[in-house]
Image (cartoon, grey):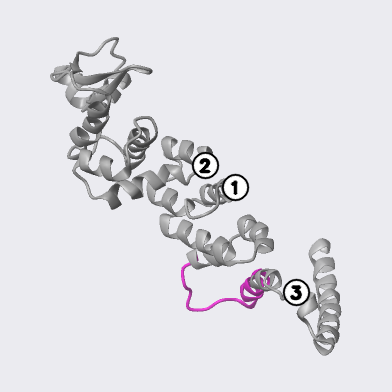
Amino acid sequence: MERSMRQYGQMTPIIVGRFEKDGYEVVDGFKRLRAGIKLEYERLDARLFNGGVRAAKAAMIQLNSKARSMSDLEKALVIRSLHKDEGLKQVEIAKLLARHPSWVCRRLALVERLCDEVVENLRLGLINVTSGRELAKLPRGNQISAMETAIKHQFTSDETARLTAMLINEPRWNHESILAFPAAILLDRQPGRPSRSKRLTFFDRIIKMQMWIGDAPRLEELTDAQRDLLVSAIERIEEAFGQIRRQLKDG
């Protein structure tokens, strides 16, 4: 679109609707609008959509579905506006858009279950819509920290789904260590090697030990015999790690 408008100019007007509270909103022509902004157009030709507010919002989705000019998030925001601002039920929105109610429900859930910070990062393209759906499975209070971990390590959608599942299934006291270093996901990224040095194997075992410790049972669940064995094992581990720490510091 940008190349076309640079060479031939704007050939088709954008369609705008009159919204009582928000003024004019684009109904059709999002690609032309974005290209015009990039090309620093001072004005664009526009045609007014004569339908009401509900019809204009429905037309936003209908007219841009085939051209894929709107992202799933943008569609979800329009559907939420029809639901909240216009007071339409999900079944009514489905009929208005000629879609199945489940289609409306999935897109509405995308923004209803997400906190504002995650929605904003979806807008900016820092996370994709599939990852957003995975984060929506978490409570709102946990979504930001999970999103920050996914962005920090550049998680794919599948990796974000694994992170979400870990946070759902693991006890709450393990969440901080998982978010700080999701070893189970990051180590799977490493390509397989025909042979591995003993040092690397030792490193992997230390990382896994960190995960095992986080998954330890509650102390009150241990028998007296188990407590004695655990104390003895911890003392040996402390002594061994003390020697390793001294060697590492000495260089």
Residue 128 seen in this snapshot: no
Magenta extent? 190-207
Which badge, 2 or 3, is on the more N-terminal residue? 2
What x and y, as percent, mark residue 93? 27, 40
Q: Are marks 2 and 3 in contact (CB under 8 Å)?
A: no
**Which quadrant of the figure has residue 61?**
top left
Kind of residue at badge 1: Gly
Residue 146 locus on image (x, y percent) = 56, 51
Q: Which residue is mark 1?
A: 141
Label 1 sits on a secondary structure element that is helix
User: Residue 239 occupies which quadrant of the picture?
Assistant: bottom right
| Mark 2 neighbour class, 10 Å CA radius: few under 14, some 14 to 19, many 20 or more | some
Marks 2 and 3, how far apart in space? 33 Å
Which three-letter amino acid code belongs to the residue tagged 2? Cys
Q: Residue at x 52, y 42 (%)?
A: 115
Identified at 81% across, 72% down, the residue is 241
Q: Is residue 202 magenta?
A: yes
Task: Work out how far the residue at label 2 is from the one at label 1, CA to CA, in angstroms.
Answer: 8 Å
Tag 3 and tag 1, C-beta contact below 8 Å? no
- The type of residue carrying mark 3 is Arg
* Residue topped by disc 2: 115
